Amino acid sequence: MCCFPSLSNIYSNIVTAGLSHGEVLLPDSLIAAVGETVVFTTTVTPPEAPFLIVTWSFYDIHGAHSNIITSSNEDLTGPAYTDRITLFRANGSLELRNLTLSDSGKYTPVSNVVVTFSSTDLVEFSSSVRLSCSSSGSSLSFFWLNGSSEVTASDRVQLTDGGSTLTIVSVTRYDQGPFRCRVFNPISNGSSDPTDQKYSLTLSPSQEYYAEGSDIILSCSADSRPAALYKWLLNGDLLSDTGPQLKLMNIQMNQSGNFSCRAFNSNTLISQTSQPSVVNVLVPVSNVKVNSSTTDILESSSSSVRLSCSSSGSSPSFLWLNSSSEVTASDRVQLTDGGSTLTIANVTRYDLGPFRCHVSNHFSNSTSDPVELLIICESFICDVVFLHFILSSMYFIGDHIFLRFPASVGPDNINLTISPSQEYYDEGSDVTLTCSAPSRPPVMILWFLNGDQLSDTEPELRLVNIQMSQSGNYSCLAFNNRTMRNQTSQPSAVSVLKCKLGRNDLLQPRA
């Protein structure tokens, strides 16, 4: 007869009920003789419905694993246990009969799980690394995790030495971990500390874009004992700066890029590189100018004009304005060269402008001075009254008269006033007539008496020592020599009476 000390320690039981899964610990060690029968009871409370799956496994003294029975829709019994076992599905207990010496064993719990590296200074795509897992305990099995995912063998990943050694060939940035080694035997399990360090990389001030000339401080920290040593990288290239802070004073555009820090523990020989933080340096927008391919354009279906906008600054965006309205692309309007060039085809008198170019980047903007176009129109009907004022700006082609239409306004709302304002004026009085009309540029003025043009052209018509012969209906005409528009006031009557009366006659004003 032979005894089996701690017989229960070598058996592992897994039960699945519904969607739950778990290992079931056995209550106590079992001692039995060769040929006898033992029952491995569980601590599971029997569910209302039978377990979906029950699995019993056995680990020998060398750690080799064998299946005793897996019971689901059908029972799969290991060859060594055929006709020797009975499974109780209600609570997952197992009866083992006809015991043999090979059914016994003694196990030591898992402890002190440690991972070591072959190298920590790795180059992406060209370096390889070997991670070795060591542990106290007997009959050990090994299981590797990268983050929360199981590591399995592949073209680049090798698991050797019973799974205790993990080798990664041609490392990539996705092989940074953290890696953990989990070790277990039939009676216990343990896990190593993660291979990475907790680190953080912060920028101050924190913003998406920085103006050239700004001051920026990058700070790197990592949980490490002893304190970590720090190095800095820009776009993957090692900088000469060391220490937990990198100060970038009066930063320039050529310093834009991906900054990262590397923390190194000189005792564990473990290093970790932070995720990169992007620093975008931009030059503010300035010196916005608009150039026109021409400023004198004939209104026709074949004419066109091109406006080009230039500026200093980085990453500019362009917006065109016609007066206060945004210019958008259409059949006649094209925006090219990233929006910096505006081309107008089939020019009309409504394309006068003024045009402005508004340039912006992520933190600055500026607008050009206005540009006004001179549109030459062939369908203008002139008024003979003010024709002599515009002869100097006329063009004759065949039977057509061409006038320039600049980007101006008015005249509008002409107004004629008389001072002093009264029904009759004594001969010898002083009378002032004032003509006004809002306009840009200021209007030219013509004065008329009873429809006949006077020689006066100023906004004020001064009638000093007025005589009866100057009685009549006065009017003024306002003319804008840029818009080619004119407006005539309503007539105002001036009645002059003779101061000295002869034969007691009242002299009526001359009509």
Image (tube, rainbow, N blue to C red):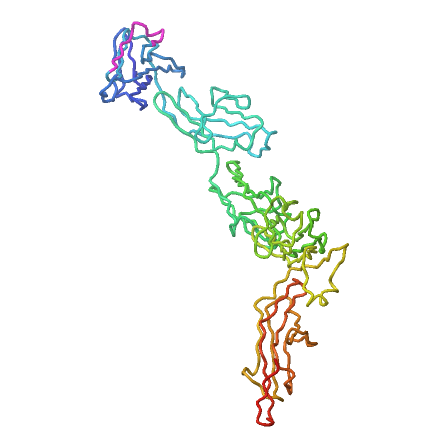
Q: Quadrant of the rendered structure where residue 450 is?
A: bottom right
Above or below: residue 431 compared with residue 209: below
Q: Residue at x 48, y 36 (%)?
A: 196
Q: Nearer the viewer, residue 268 or 485?
A: 485
Q: Is residue 471 visible?
A: yes
Please tell me which residue lies in front, 183 or 402. Answer: 402
Above or below — where is 205 with respect to 56?
Answer: below
Q: Which residues are magenta?
A: 76-89
Asked if residue 341 is positioned above or below residue 495 in the image, the reply reads: above
Residue 199 lies left or right of residue 319; in this view the side is: left
Horizontal relation, residue 239 to residue 387: left or right: left
Taking the magenta stretch, the answer to whether it contains residue 147 is: no
Which part of the image, by quadrant, shows the N terminus?
Answer: top left
Q: How many marks?
A: 0
The answer to whether residue 341 is visible is no
The outermost residue toward the top is 83
User: Residue 374: x and y, percent?
Assistant: 69, 57
Which quadrant does the C terminus fall into? bottom right
Q: In this rendered view, identify the residue nearer to me: 333 or 429.
A: 429
Rendered location of residue 208, percent (x, y):
53, 48
Residue 380: % across, % down: 67, 58
Q: Relative to residue 508, is residue 473 depicted above or below?
A: above
Residue at screen point 33% across, 17% down = 10
Q: Position of residue 390 (x, y in %)?
A: 71, 65
